[in-house]
Amino acid sequence: MLQDITYFYYYVIIPKIKTVDKEILADAQKIWDINTKTERFQGRFGIYPVAVGRKLAEDFYGLSDRINEVTNPTTLEEVYTAELKRRSLAEAVFLDHALSGRPYIFEDVINIYGIEPDDIQNLRPWLDKNRGPTLNAIERVFAEIEVREYELTLPLDRPGVRRQTEEYAQQRVSVYHRRLGRMFEQITGVGGFLRDITSVITIDPRSYFDLYTKTLAISIPAICYLTEDGLPQLRERELIRLFGHEGFGHGCNKIATEAAASSPFFLKIVSGATMASLESVAQFYERQIFEDLKASVETQKALEIRHLFDDIYREEIDTQLINQYKARFFQYGITVLADRSLGNPQDPAVVAKKTEILESVALYPRSAQELVESYKQYFDSEGNLYPQVVAELRYTAQPTQKVLDALKARGFTYQDHRTKTDILLLQGYWTPIGLVQRAKVA
């Protein structure tokens, strides 16, 4: 039944939907094809064709100017039009800055990533509201959770330990991929897409999903540790979270996007303008997977964690607020660091002022000082915080929650319309604004 719904959406509804102006779309395709070639060229030769890039920036600006402004789209065609204009302008601004050498001011980076101002403005009020509850949560978790021994870092430089751990980790990752895939197939029409990706282990400290090879790489250091008696153990909770974030969030996003044959081409291209939405969606599924597992005792048994799951789930719920607070404190810290109105970032008085601002919402006073001091050198000659640091604010974007709120306002809950909502979230690479607009007219 769920598969029938998915088929109907992809192959019956979508082909009947009008898209943006065909001539503009054709010209846009040519411009993006050249842009893709420059990226591949740079990857192969380690150098960028500057003259071509400058012409590309002009073409993207020109393309954006040709597209009509649609402020409040009411049809999917208008949503596509508005999204193409946003995407074109974002590419133009990115290339313009990168090739001209002009510094990136804070607003430039925010605009390139499509982060809505309210998501940034809400950081401080959220911290003020949740600092007390987070400190209480830390004390509660300490009192309730048993910590019987140290979790030691894996010495992967030792061949015996590495071989033993790799075999153990790969076996567990394979079981999780198979069993979670079966669970997702039973609860959502896009669940089968998990079967179209490959799961492997990696010694890289960060897990990731490779969009080009469709490979989910799970970090051994992230999911495994050594006990005090020298035995490798699995962090089951972290493995579950990674399958939700990287596997379902990013992996199924890729497969679902490719399956939507009639979507405009630009919705199948990842760029800086879409990264905030991609991460917001992935963060949603890293939380949702625990709710799905809680409701599936059969899957808990298949994963051999039935006797552990209550503790896994309780620990996840207890630590979600703590982890969210730490992330938002760092994000708010970026906005304070980037505030040029406070003065020269190298001035000790300015450093002290920024530290004072952050101390009032820091979980520990020392963490405010460490944040300011550690990024003191990450500024250009004009006092702008480096764009790669400001870019971390893409994790503040909340388009997924806004999609759920928009659907709920029309009487659609995620639980009752799981497949349709998953399709909205996973089909296509959208800017944050575009993803929400699409949900409102879907």
Image (cartoon, rainbow, N blue to C red):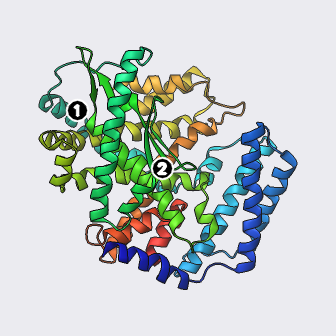
Residue 363 seen in this snapshot: no
Label 2, secondary structure: give it: helix
The answer, for residue 438, to whether it is visible in the render is yes
Q: Nearer the viewer, residue 71 or 241?
A: 241
Secondary structure of the residue carrying numbered label 1:
helix
List the single residue furthest toward the bottom.
16
**Considering the image in quadrants, where does the N terminus appear?**
bottom left
What residue did someone put label 1 on? 138
Q: Is residue 96 above or below residue 256?
A: above
x, y (%) of residue 27? 77, 70
Snapshot quadrant of residue 380? top right
Along the horizontal axis of the image, is 305 left or right of 377?
Answer: left
As shown in the figure, which amino acid type bears the numbered disc 2? Ile
Residue at 43%, 63% in the rendered image: 425
Does the CB distance between marks 1 and 2 fall below 8 Å? no
- Relative to 143, is 400 above or below? below
User: Which of the pair 359/265 is nearer the observer?
Assistant: 265
Q: Tell whether 316 sits left or right of 342.
A: left
89 and 218: which is toward the camera: 218
Q: Horizontal and vertical percent for residue 406?
A: 38, 70
Q: Is residue 153 above or below residue 60?
A: above
Q: Which residue is mark 2?
A: 120
> Toward the viewer: 406 or 435?
435
Looking at the rendered structure, the kind of residue marked 1 is Ile
| Neighbours of disc 1 within 10 Å: few (<14), some (14-19), many (20+) | some
- Where does the C terminus fall, quadrant-wise? bottom left
